[in-house]
Image: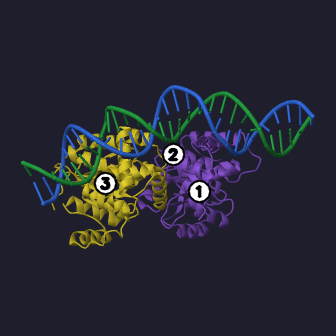
Chain colours: A yellow, B purple, C blue, D green
Amino acid sequence: MNRAAHSPESGKSSILLVDDHRMVLDGYTLLINAQPDLTVCATAASAPAALSAAGTSRPDLVITDLTMQGRGGLDLIKDLLAVLPGLRILVCSMHDEMLYAERALRAGAKGYIMKDSDGPTFLAAIRKVLDGGIYMSAQLSARVLDAFAGSRPRGSSSPMEKLSDREFEVFRFFGEGKTAKEIADQLNLSPKTVSVHRDHIKEKLNYTTSAEMIREAVRWVESQN
Amino acid sequence: MNRAAHSPESGKSSILLVDDHRMVLDGYTLLINAQPDLTVCATAASAPAALSAAGTSRPDLVITDLTMQGRGGLDLIKDLLAVLPGLRILVCSMHDEMLYAERALRAGAKGYIMKDSDGPTFLAAIRKVLDGGIYMSAQLSARVLDAFAGSRPRGSSSPMEKLSDREFEVFRFFGEGKTAKEIADQLNLSPKTVSVHRDHIKEKLNYTTSAEMIREAVRWVESQN
DNA sequence: CGCCGTCATAGGCGGATCGCCTATTCACAG
DNA sequence: CTGTGAATAGGCGATCCGCCTATGACGGCG
């Protein structure tokens, strides 16, 4: 186990925590700092803060939530890896893994764990990722292996799987009652880009009107809560 | 301040924490137990566990998340109040308050705070609710006061009560994913008329954008089974 | 009975948005 | 190296939105 590559002095692996809920940051910090081999070197409550903190503190591992206000967590993963290639990222989300984990791992994360995991599971995930492994639940890994095995009962799965990451993100925003313009502002895009995404979503999911698409987006977001 | 009614021995106000994310529970516990006048008497990670824990530990206050798996922070509020009438409940949600706070308060909660609040704000909310007050953000209270300012022919029923028959009809059509034009065609009206109804609905229900109104319409239609 | 508030209807108008088309860049697969 | 798809965004005409005004109908009220 050679975890201490970036922490020559302490011998502890340094971790950057990213979550927009302070209480969650406190909870993680409490748990992690109680471990002899781990230490929290920085925390951040937003994507920009996370990028900045990652640049200065050079953590061995970043643990991040997926859904932060504005600029989804997937973008943060990509940005972090663009700045610090090889950085290990463990996604810790409150959302059902089936819906987000695949995207997160494809974006470059090395693990996905749900927030309702208990301490030991959580620490096991951290150490597995620090050791160069990929952490995911048994269910999820089964699903991934299944997908790689070539079995394709396509169509029975969610129609949303046809959407690209960006389209999916826009879809969710529409489901939250946001205007195209509001979404554009929040993602720092031109309204035109959002409208193109909207068009593609409509086409991929076979909706004839935007109102219909929005309704289904709202229903879908509802079903996630 | 007579907060210790149910905690004769310690003099501290006892709090039951409910959240399905253990890390969140840890963070809250850390903060609360550091206060001289507050103590966490129990935690629960599910609605049934919360009901059971509330019955045995008789807390002065319950702090609960709204969205737990198995559907229903709102149901938990109602169930808790059914078992322990007069119990004070502070909802601590990660969701935009505009979307859930009203429902939570109508269900009987005495406060609503977002998870990204900092410690002092959080403690202020706890103490305010323990003292018999109602805690909500300035924005939210402004919205509530605004809504109650010009209307109370009925004590407090559905917000849709304020809509005229025609407006309500239009509202439902929007909730079914219909376009303004489609609604106009179906009701043999000019699109302009429908748009005026839409404007009035937005005004009466205090929505700032049409997208927000449509989202709530969809949610309402959904809730009608 | 006349007055006022509300409802339902709808037109006007300027600016915003939609729907569709095209284009550039980039990444990745074949 | 070439093609496909994703992400970004501009153009443009038609449509829609948001706000204002207006008319007729109904219903309570002094």
Q: CA distance from mark 3 to mark 2?
A: 23 Å
> For the residue labelled by badge 3, is the local secondary structure a helix, a strand or a loop?
loop
Q: Could you give the CA–CA distance between mark 1 and mark 2, rounded to whole angstroms?
A: 14 Å
In front of the other: B33 or C20: C20
Measuring 59% from the left and 56% from the top, which residue is drawn there? B220
Q: Chain of mark 3?
A: A
Q: CA distance from mark 3 to mark 1?
A: 29 Å
Please, what is the three-letter code of the amino acid marked with disc 2? Ala
Residue A42, given in percent of the width and then of the height, sits at 31, 46
Residue B190 visible to the viewer? yes
For residue B220, the mark is 1
Residue displayed at 33% across by 46% down = A43
Give the residue at x 31% y 51%.
A74
**Residue B147 sits in quarter:** top right
Q: Which mark is residue B211?
A: 2
Q: Is residue A109 visible?
A: no
Q: Where on the picture, by quarter, is residue A97? A: bottom left
Tag 3 residue:
A164
The N terminus of chain A lies in which quarter of the figure? bottom left
* Sequence order check, earlier mark of 1 and 2: 2
Disc 3 with disc 2 on a shared chain:
no
Query: x, y percentage for residue A220?
Result: 45, 59
Pointer 3 with pointer 2, Cβ within 8 A: no
Image coords of residue B3 (percent x, y): 64, 53
